Image (cartoon, coloured by chain):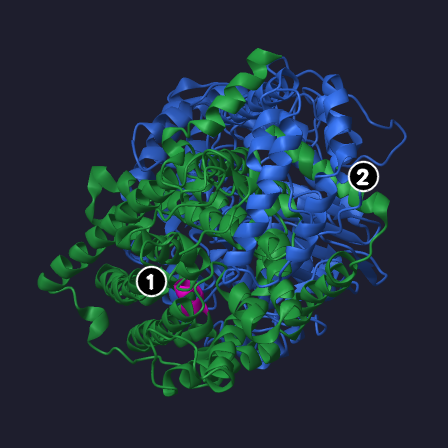
Amino acid sequence: MEKEVGPVYGKTTEPSKSDTMESGDQSGVHMKKELGLFGAVAIIVGTIIGSGIFVSPAGVLKDTGSVGLSLLVWIGCGVLSTIGALCYAELGTTITKSGADYAYLYEAFGPLPAFLQLWVNLIVIRPTSQAIVALTFGNYIIKPAFPECSPPPVAVSLLAAVCIVTLTIINAMSVRVAARVQGLFTVAKLAALVLIIIAGIVFMAMGKVNNFKKPFEGSVTDVKGISLAIYSALFSYAGWNFLNFVTEEIEDSQKTLPRAIYISLPIVSFVYVMANVAYFTRMDVPEIISSLETAVIFGNKFLGVMSWIIPVFVALSCFGGVNGLLFTSGRLFFVGAREGHLPEVMGMIHSKRLTPLPAILFTGALSVIMLMFSDNIYSLINYVSFVQWLSVGGSIAAMIYLRYKRPNMDRPIKFNIAIPIIFIGACIFLLVASLFAAPRDTGLGCLITLTGIPVYFIFIAWKNKPKSFNRIVVSWTNAFQKIFEVVRQTEKCE
Amino acid sequence: MITLPGYYIIILYTSYSSLQAVCTSGKMSNNQENVKDAESQATSADDVTALSTSEQKVKISDARDFTSKELPPPYAGMGKEMVLHHSGTPGWKRARKILLLVFWGSWVALLGSVIYITVTHPRCKLRPSMQWWQKTSFYHIYPATYLDSDGDGSGDLNGIKSKLDYIKGLHVETIWLGAFYKSPLEDYGYDVSDYRDVDGRYGSLEDFDGLLEQIHAEGLKLVIDFIPNHSSDKHTWFERSVARDPLYDNYYIWRDCGTQTNLSLPNNWLSISGDPAWTYHPIRGQCYFHQYLPSMPDLNLRNEDVRVELDNILRYWLDRGVDGVKVDSADRLFEDLYLRDEVSTNPSAVKDYDSLHHNMTRNQPEVLDMLNRWRGVLDSYGSPDRIMVTDTVGSPGDLKDYYGKTRNGGAHLPLNHELVQVTNVTNGIAISELISGSLDNLPESSTIHWMLGEQNGHRVASRVGLDKLDILHMLLLLLPGVPTSYYGDEIGMTSASSSTYLNRGLSRSVMQWNPDYQKCSGFSTNCSNILVNPSAATYNVQNETVDLSSHLTVFRNLTELRLEDTFVYGEFAEHIVTENIYSFRRYFDGMDTYLVSINAGDIAETVDMSTKVVDGSTQATVVALTGNVTEYSLDQEVDLSEIKLSPGQGVVVSWPYVIKQYL
């Protein structure tokens, strides 16, 4: 017995190396600030640029009908996303907690709206997004073995599972390694896009500018077409608020967070627009619209024997995308649990590795489960895109509300009130548009969200639950703690 | 040492609550009171003793004791030291090890199964490499009745040449030109008197060359009739054979048969008119054999001289540039060497052609050797293939042999007459049996052929009725393989009212170009002796071109649709077959899937066509329709679970290949 207790005792009295960066309290356990400016930029750029720009810029082109209008939409949506991100820079420095939308909704509108946001993210948005990006990864990795046809779906799903499990392990093991993975893969995907952009510039220099001679020929003029185009372009920009999910882990977040936003959004917008320009140098409008893998086809036109490089980069890009999603999902659920909205154990971190291990494991496991329903996850993600915009809009509304309600809050960054108002206008437009364009999907999305209300009242609002229930919860929590060596994060005084 | 756990609880919670007191900024909800409760309870002596006495059951009892004093949620969990203490015990260590092992084990298993599946999964189905004739479609023209360009009352080669635009617009790729050789025209030109010349009524050799050049310029192909079984009795070979010219003595099948007044025929064989197949020739004093009319004596293909003649004739036309030949009457090329009697099917029956089993006069084993020899001639022209099509009568089982027993033997495409047998389309199951009968008998890696109409017998529109013509065209043009369309069937021409020998005129009325049937519908400027079916007022190229629900428009839509890769390369699978409905899918890896459904019966039926077991598709886009469909329209999105078809209606829908892995 002595032997077993000994090391425990020893460890606690003589802090190991990993513990040394903690605060003076020897039993203090909390996550470290591992994200510098580069890491922060990698989170934003790495999650925004998923596979979309490689796989199918067709959506925007199809809905706008012309080269010129589609480029305008890409630029416009880049600007709009930048405006949104600026608002989040203000929110992120004003409310310095991790969790992004969840934290902001909580702060301004109280626990119920925040819980619903958390709920939808927990059961649908995060696991499905992770599963979908992982599936794309699997498909591109396995594709070379099946050049002329689609690979066996089982193998793709299993490979997606391998991707999710691997990244779950990495994220559970070390925040630093996860951040490095994010940085590495963000560089890789940018390299691929830079390659495409340079090729495009070379082709333009060679005089391949036929598609730009009459840029607006064939443009649609109806509102519906343009709305759909804007919708799908904004979908490609989605992820600009991801850094705010991890505010607490950014070094000197008051400065780093806004800087990362200022750097990332222009990079992404530039890369998106220029990649589209590059495609137009060698591909006609119908060819792009009908292509499932625009970048691959484009790559085949100039890379020759090196054309395998594009699918590999797409796969890497997806891998990095899954990592970014898992990284931020872990923090979101961690914060949710910390506020008592999720089981206590989800808000715990590993006593030595200092990673939000239970939250990461949970979201990873749920993603793998989603893979088993890969037939339906695509429609599932459609249903909830409405909710996502509602949540972003709500956060911006929270920002305006707090300006009015708590004018004296410490706001290191404060933009002109016009900025959030412009963005909230855009959000309202998108919400109304999707309500009209896909009332059924929107309704289902709302329904999924509203299932959170009974959950909220039973598990959170109801304080005097039976003792037996509490006892079970506690014993489970203890068991989890013992097997995963996780503890509640102790507050850190700054 | 023993009281250590309890001690740590106290330390931890004291420090925790003091931290809470100082650092409240980060918390949104405060559970300070809860913690204080816990503190006071944990410090009570009960707990300390309980913990100290239950060392052996530390795992379970500890937690229970700790919580038994009703900690209200949220429960903050154990502190780090507690956790580390417990997790360091052998039981939890082992549990953690096992968990890790399971975790890594399943990771390796996942990766392993991905590799295993990838390695063992069948490789991509590549598009089969196909020769032109495997994906072509024939348009069969009888030259005498297509278009008269010079006003002599007979259609001609230049007439065909002037209509190549129309033919190209039908999206057919190979013109099959019926007999155009010099002939007394006792059997519509199939009684050839000179194999190396064009009959004057149709034009000249120059006209032929001009037509062929134009056909090739349009990117089309030309296949001509090759008639080696018999010649006309006006052919010089026959005249010299009658005169017992030693060079031509054995060009035909001569046998002693008594005298003109006292005939004793060599055997009981019949010609297809039902008369004896032997005719006495008074000059030579012998009987000659003829499968057809007495004016069409059968050539003796057992004579090497005749075979050489035929080889040279074949080369003569191939040298001119034709892309292939249709070997006429291929099954009748040889008869039994010993001239044995054929067995009667029914001794008491009327003495017509069908009263005998033609096991001595048809499908003789020598036929295949002959075809192989001609195939050699064709193959000597290299690439692109010059093709041999054989015309035979018989079951799909009989057709098997004509594909040849070796890779480069036999015909490229034996004509398959199964759909011509369709006289009464009322049953989806019957159609299914007909089609699978043909497909099941198809030798491996061979190409199947389909046809609805031919020059002998009734036109398809008269056999099945105009209301079911479109659905049969759907079958003809969208089934896998090569279709032949007989001229005029695309506009729904019906059989001629009057006929001649063996009904051979029924399908040979003039092409109906415009509604003015009094003036032979645009066929000729000289209409004195030409009868045109009055239905030409409705069914003619001019009217049907502009009518979007006409037979011609439907035909054109279908021929255009069959150019899609799925129809060229795709697999075939029957889908739903009922008393009324016949439906099938065409599909291929990575290509759009098509579903063709027709109602061949007499009752409207609504069928669930959703492909649950195949790829889960429930929605599809309408890509082709028969002219009588009003419930659906082109490009319409339809729910596959409810496809309603009335009799004679057909619809083709498609959906994209299901690739779930793309975003």
Q: In percent of the image, x 42 and y 49: which residue is there?
A: A324
In this rendering, the count of numbered labels is: 2
Q: Which residue is mark 1?
A: A257
Chain identifier matching the green colour in the rendered picture: A
Q: Which chain is blue?
A: B
Quarter occupied by the C terminus of chain A:
bottom left
Q: Position of residue B625 (x, y in %)?
A: 63, 65
Residue A494 visible from this viewpoint: yes
Depicted B582 relative to depicted A209: above or below? above
Front residue (pair B21, A420): B21
Residue depicted at x 42% and y 61%: A244
Magenta extent = A232-238
Mark 2, residue position: B68
**Dot 1 crowding, Cα within 10 Å, few <14, some 14–19, many 20+:** many
Q: Quadrant of residue A385?
A: bottom right
Which three-letter amino acid code belongs to the residue tagged 1?
Leu
Image quadrant occupied by the N terminus of chain A: top right
